[in-house]
Image (tube, rainbow, N blue to C red):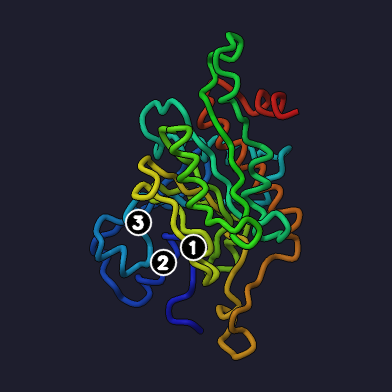
Amino acid sequence: MQSVPRTDLAAEAIFHADARGHARDGYSLREETVEGLPVLAAEIFTPAAAQKLGKPVGRYYTLTLPEEPRRSSDCFRDASAALAALLRRLLPETPETVLVAVLGNPDITPDALGPLTAQSVLPTRHLQGQEEFSALRPVAVFRTGVLGCTGMEAAQQVRALCRALSPDAVIAVDALAGADPRSLCRCVQLCDSGISPGSGVCNDRQPLDRALLGVPVLGVGVPTVVDAAVFGESEESTGLFVTPRSIDREVRSCARLLGYSIDLALQPALSPEDVEYFLE
């Protein structure tokens, strides 16, 4: 078993640091409940703590889902409300324009979370100036694609777009890697430290963060894979990642949940039914 399992989740990194007997010096973790759902709120305060945990300085929220968040379920309604509330905590106060940048490869199911999420995010920037949409915040949605298909780093694309649009904040959505198989498609991490594409699967790309883009960057993701080494180290498990057998269905459910949550956070006057109406 790996002494330090690979994970994109700050809460998991803290749990493993605790298991190794490290004092919580420069970081914290507490439990709370939002809309009846359990949330782990982590904060990393110092560069030393960030280096120890392998996560940037910032605030992290991990919401646990009791079941697959199907659109018709109570879980979906509660989780979308909870995630919207947590996103509003992380967003700058009254941002005018927000860019939602989705990362990942739509042709690889565990990596398709971002592109699928984009299908449920309401783009409204082009509606500005029309009186009937005056209550809606301007939102732009961008699908970055992946380096092997575009020849461009996702971070380079988003930086160029930020220069053109001048958003007040960026929400970056990507699939994550977890260390606990029970977390796969059953939790959502939100953070204000940005996102590092591919970091969980040993394919580090340039991070999307405030230092690069010049505006607050919120990272949103769901773990869809786990390193096979957590089941026991062997030569055969090196470089292998495991995903749920039901990933095709579950990644779509999670992507819809993220899309609705982003819509509700950015457009607080809308209900889930309003979002569904506009998406149709």
Q: Residue furthest top?
A: 131
Instruction: Name the residue carrying label 1.
Output: 205
Left or right: residue 28 versus residue 33 is: left
Q: Earlier in the sequence, mark 1 or mark 2?
A: 2
Nearer the observer: mark 2 or 3; the answer is 2
- Amino acid type at circle 3 is Leu
Q: How many marks?
A: 3
For the point 55% across and 64% down, the residue is 177
- Amino acid type at circle 2 is Ala
Rounded to the nearest angstrom, the CA distance separating label 3 from label 1 is 28 Å
For the point 59% across and 58% down, the residue is 151
Residue 160 against residue 225 in the figure, above or below: above
Q: Earlier in the sequence, mark 2 or mark 3?
A: 2
Q: Secondary structure at mark 3?
A: strand
Residue 78 against residue 16 in the figure, above or below: above
Rounded to the nearest angstrom, the CA distance separating label 2 from label 3 is 11 Å
Location of residue 141 in the rendering, given as x and y in whole percent from the top left corner: 58, 37
Q: Residue furthest front?
A: 151
Left or right: residue 17 versus residue 150 is: left
- Amino acid type at circle 1 is Arg
Residue 275 lies in quadrant: top right
Location of residue 259 in the rendering, given as x and y in whole percent from the top left corner: 61, 39
Instruction: Name the residue carrying label 2.
Output: 13
Instruction: Name the residue carrying label 3.
Output: 29
Q: Secondary structure at mark 2?
A: helix
Residue 106 against residue 119 in the figure, above or below: below
For the point 55% across and 48% down, the residue is 173
Residue 90 visible in image:
yes
Rounded to the nearest angstrom, the CA distance separating label 1 from label 2 is 20 Å
- Mark 2 crowdedness (10 Å alpha carbons): few <14, some 14-19, many ≥20: many
